[in-house]
Amino acid sequence: MIEVIDTGPLNTIQDLGRTGFRDIGVTVSGAMDPLALKVANLLVGNEEGAAGIELQTFPFRVRFGKEVAVAVTGGGNATLDGVAMPPWWVQTAQAGQILEVTPVAGSARGYVAFGGGVDVEPVMGSRSTSLRGAFGGMEGRALRKGDLLPLGDAPVSELAMTGFGVVAPMLEMTSLFPVVEDGTVLIRALPAGEHDLFGADAERFWRQTWKISPQSDRTGYRLAGDPIRPVAPVEMRSHGIVAGVVQVPPAGEPIIQMSDANTAGGYPKIAGIVEADLWRLGQARAGIRVRFVRSSHAEARALDKAMTDYLEDIRATSQMVARALKTIAGH
Amino acid sequence: MTDLNLSDPAVIAAISGALTKAGVDGIEIEHERQKLRIVVEHNGVASVLAPAAGRAQTSLAKAPLAGIFQAVDGTLPRHVAAGENLGFVRVGPILLPVKAAKTGVLIRALAEHNALVGYGDPLFEIELNS
């Protein structure tokens, strides 16, 4: 059990999402930066998809009711009873200790995982909070002061007792995730169904730098820039959409569907973002500039593989290190 | 080595002589609870800077495993608390902490950032508060 003793608004319990129910209008939800949540889970010894806490507002403080491994990744700086934890790190908290998480400059969301995971009742196979649907997670709502969160049972590993961490993905995979010098985030995408209906404006979609507008949240990011419009007005029936789809409403400024994406929409789709780049948008705050880079299915697959390899490397190396330390200690 | 007494003048004289003869600039020896530091000056005379006993005790933070040493920012010397993280040893994507075993003043980093270090290699020297 952990007790929330301080939180801002919009901090929620999330796992990797509620897949398989879009056809009946159920949003997938799940972590906006699934990579950070997966790493946090690996650090505490959970399966990648266990439920943790997504932090969008700070500071956030919890008090521990028992000894448990706790990891903080993504855009969160943590202290345990006032002692700083390095970034992307797991440590063992004792009953009564307080974890405080504050924001990291240049990131939007922090993730906290606990050994055993946050053990709220799953709804349709997931513990993710759907704020718009008001179900899942903690009573379908954001966390608030005084909430008591149940944790699953899990032994604390010796490595988590010592404390250890990982090299952050942007440092470990620098060559795979380019950023241009002025801080513009380069997002790879493939042309989508209605791309060619935009004629010359389609090229302006790729060429210009867009700014993430303040009207952005877990449902979608609105982009600000020179409007783009189809050559002729496009009338479409609503059709299924997923996170990563870039739509262009009549005003001409694109919308990127994010984790709480609508399940259907009727705006023309100009592009689809490759899944491996979605976590970087999840960490991009309002005001950040993004540019779309035309990708390919082959590149998208290669990026997926690199991310899987990074996670597998963490899993295998941490087990190897744990065995080596055990041997040295003479157990 | 078991009978080595670093406070024995004969031992110090013998080591100093050997260093001078070999053209070595100096040596630092830690044996049991004694520590000896000899520096050979350019005129060929050896001077003993750290007598074997009576000086501040030091504690070494050592590599928990073989890997790549990762330094963290921080000025020297500075006060550190027992258990404080001083740097990391990197094994693939994993970072292991190098912790101060005792409270004291961190006086020296003994490895370069990104250097390959072996298990037990001394990485930091902490002067213990007397």
Image (cartoon, rainbow, N blue to C red):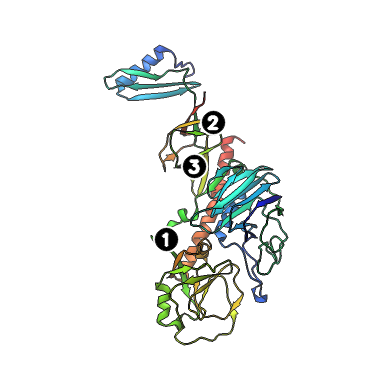
Report how far apart the C-alphas of labels 2 and 1 lie in the structure: 41 Å
Query: Where residue B128 sits: x, y (%)?
Result: 51, 27
> Circle 3 sits on which residue?
B88
Of discs 1 and 3, which sits in the foreground? 1
Q: Nearer the viewer, residue A235 or B91?
A: A235
Task: Give the secondary structure at mark 3.
Answer: strand
* Chain at numbered mark 1: A
Q: What residue is rendered at 49% in x and 74% in y?
A: A254
Quarter of the image with the C terminus of chain A in it? top right
Residue A29: quadrant of the picture? bottom right
Secondary element at tag 1 = loop
Count residues near mark 1 (Cα–Cα under 10 Å), then give few for <14, some for 14-19, many for 20+: few
Identify the residue under disc 1: A183
Helix, strand or loop for disc 2: loop
Residue depicted at x 59% and y 69%: A219
Who comes first in sequence, dot 3 or dot 2?
Answer: 3
Residue A148 location (% of width, % of height) = 72, 53
Question: Could you confirm whether marks 2 and 1 are on the same chain?
Answer: no
Q: Nearer the viewer, residue A66 or A327?
A: A66
Which label number is shown at residue B103? 2
